[in-house]
Amino acid sequence: MTDARTLNTSPSITRLSDYEPYPYVIADVDLTFELHPTETRVTQRSQVRRITQGVTSIELNGKDLTRVSITIDGVEVSEDRLVEIDETLLIRQVPESFTLEIVTQLNPKANTALEGLYLSNGMFCTQCEAEGFRRITYYPDRPDVMSIFTTRIIADDQHPVLLSNGNPISDEVYPDGRRCVVWHDPFPKPCYLFALVGGHLAVQQDQFLTMSGRTIDLRIYVEHKDLDRVQYALESLKRAMAWDEQVYGREYDLDIFMIVAVSHFNMGAMENKGLNIFNSSCVLANPEAATDQAFQRIEAIVAHEYFHNWSGNRVTCRDWFQLSLKEGFTVFRDSEFSADINSRAVKRIQDVNFLRSAQFTEDGGPTAHPVQPSEYQEISNFYTLTIYEKGAEVVRMIHTLLGPVQFRQGSDLYFSRHDGQAVTINEFIAAMAEVSGRDFGQFMHWYQQPGTPRLQVDVEHDPQSGRLQILLTQKAPVIAKDNSHAPYVIPISYQVIDRESGQVLVPETLFELTEASASIEHQEVMGSPVVSVLRGLSAPVKLEMERSTHDLAALARFDDDGVNRWDAIQDLYIQAIQLLLADPEAGIQPQLADLVCGLIADPATIADPACLAEMLMLPQDNILWDVLKPADPQAILAARQSLRQHLADSGEAHWEDLYKAMKVDGPYEPEASAIGRRSLAITALGYLAKTRSVDEILSERFDKASNLTERFAAYRIARSDGSAGLSERLSRNFLAEAETDEVLDLWLSTEAMNESTATIDRLHELLSHERFTWTNPNRVRAVLGTFANRNVRAFHTPEGYRLLADAVLKLDAMNPQIASRLVMPLCQWARFTEQYQASMKAELRRMIAKDLSKDLYEIVSKSVD
Ligand code: TRP
Ligand code: ZN
């Protein structure tokens, strides 16, 4: 047995209840980097002062470091005072106050894990969150140790751009030709926010005038070839800066704000103080090389990272159990920003869809955990949908309960009271409690209990008296252990409309459910009431409500809440698929096709193209698997396809008109209304392609469109429904014209997903494509992530599972974070029927018998016994 294996079978668990403050203060840290691809030298000089009596040794963290020297007040520390176990280095018998100097050596070129200091296309860059700083130097790698950093970077002339946090304070050329640049960050910060970049980079500059009249120097650094794709991110940044001033009263604090795009990155982006580092796919865009979706993603992520400057950096987390303090809040902030500058309804529909299909799945599976977890093995595994998306939903509920004015008072109090501190979720809640006078005791269950609670709604109406009774019952999440669940505070927004006319019978009302159940009564409700409940998804719960086809159709037609309108038609699709599965001969109820035809021919509905496009998209497999447990993914796929065909045929008379009506004239703008029109046009064209050959339209759009959104759509539709000749031609041409990595990834993912052509053999071809590389996470996600999450036909087979497991094992040796994310689809075996379960579990068992990284081991071991 190897050492790593021994460690993994008895994993070390970090617990919230074990938290103890760090016994030292490190006021200042001076770092010197002598950059070299294989032998970078790092010298750390820290001013350390003891604050806890009785402690005589100091604990630092380090990982994969070559130790060159350690001195205290200039004197070498002898080996017998050092104890290094796993990632902890203990120095014994240290004085009360001292200067610690540590020299380490690193090999950035060999770093394929992309944590710590690594090379991406020849550019030096860092990723320190959550625990990457320990791969740079020995240091207390925990967020509650906050210091003022000064960083000196020395490099040869191949790396003329040398960046770190804060402000540049000196720049000189040494006699030997090397350059030395010094940066100073006046704001104390934890080491996870440290960043360094060194490379041959191009820059685009701009300025922002803050609310107090300061001019901020804005810069986006990219590889030279990418300089024509930075403008949109720069505009987005300025919009985000202005929004945070207006909505939260938050002003930027340094004189310079920088963004750097790198090709190799494990996540979307990172909020390092003053120096955000981005996955290039989340910052680079121009009309020829990015889709509408990419533009919107870029705007949201630029805003997200910028917003962290306050929610995360100025006020940071005490420990990693508080991760959602910064992530949940910041996702809420960025989603409100997107809602304000685009369409609020569409943004909310997309967020709700994502939450339900992905976060609810996580919350019902083997890796379910509370928004504030109480323990973890590997922190990188806790950057989850629960921390981010459910965390944002919890903050949204606070916003709903308090209203915008009190919420703003609460956030002001939180920011001012805790500026410069590392705090817990409790401090955030305490500020909200203080301004509102509310007791958040029961509300905290949202942070502490895992799983998605269920809300049962029963409606009774007496047509004579007009008495309407709405019975609300909250039920524990399915995964809850007996008696372990306490009731939640559930904000329930509802409205009652008339089924025939759509007229509002009871206007929108907010009800707070705190008990296990409650009953709401309204008198003199005449007509045929239909209750629209959990409007805008006012709480992250699963609704259990008997709703007739008739009621759902009324909501889909008349509800003035975008989410519930969309939700009603989604529920009708689910019911139709359910019926098809039960009896394939039974067919589809004609009312559904009538409803869809009514919507696509109704000028009022077409007036909001983006919402209509969302309504015309069938529910994702993930959602269907949850409703139809235990699921047979191939049978469900077939049923979904026949529903799609049925809707296409039923609407035959309308698709072409709708497509034409949505044509966008004028130059390309990635702005909400044009995006909505394109989205509906593409949806209509997709349906049309199921009723007749549209080769001509596709071919024309592919060759003539001014933007990638339409070209990509033409290629995608041709690939699934065009003639074989056109499908091949567009695939070849799309690849041939894919100059950027981002467009290449669109091609790779489309090829990996395509249900008619993406066989296992085709997947192997993609994996050995000359432009595919295992060391770039974006390529891996494009091929393997898309395959496992989007290609039901090929993935849900014994060969598909094997392909993924083999890839995960291969990746685990290079990049554990990516491996443990990629394995997730296999961990969901419990949702499927016996036959699928057996093959999935066999792969997990095969994997667990190997020598796995801590990351992958935690996920696989939680998923299989
Ligand atoms: N804090 C980053 C965010 O904005 C998340 C992140 C970026 C991250 N890179 C990472 C987390 C690497 C873990 C590992 O959401
Ligand atoms: Zn974040």
Image: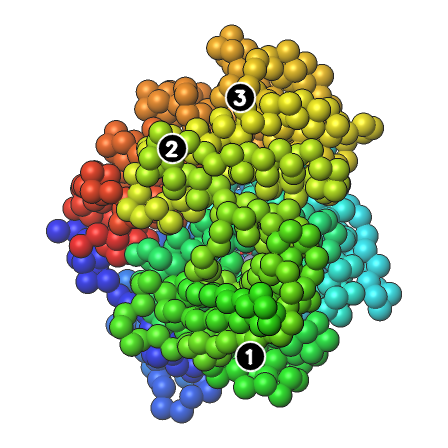
Secondary structure found at label 1: helix
Residue occupying the far top of the picture? 725
* Of pointers 3 and 2, the one earlier in the residue sequence: 2
Marks 1 and 2 close (CB-CB < 8 Å): no
Residue position marked by numbered label 1 in the rendering: 429
Label 1 to label 2: alpha-carbon separation: 53 Å
Residue sitting at x 39%, y 23%: 758
Residue 690's disc is: 3
Q: Is residue 639 left or right of residue 610?
A: left
Label 3 to label 1: alpha-carbon separation: 52 Å
Secondary structure found at label 2: helix
Residue position marked by numbered label 2 in the rendering: 586
Residue sitting at x 40%, y 91%: 53
Q: Amino acid at mark 2?
A: Ala
Image quadrant where residue 591 sits = top right
* Of pointers 1 and 2, the one earlier in the residue sequence: 1
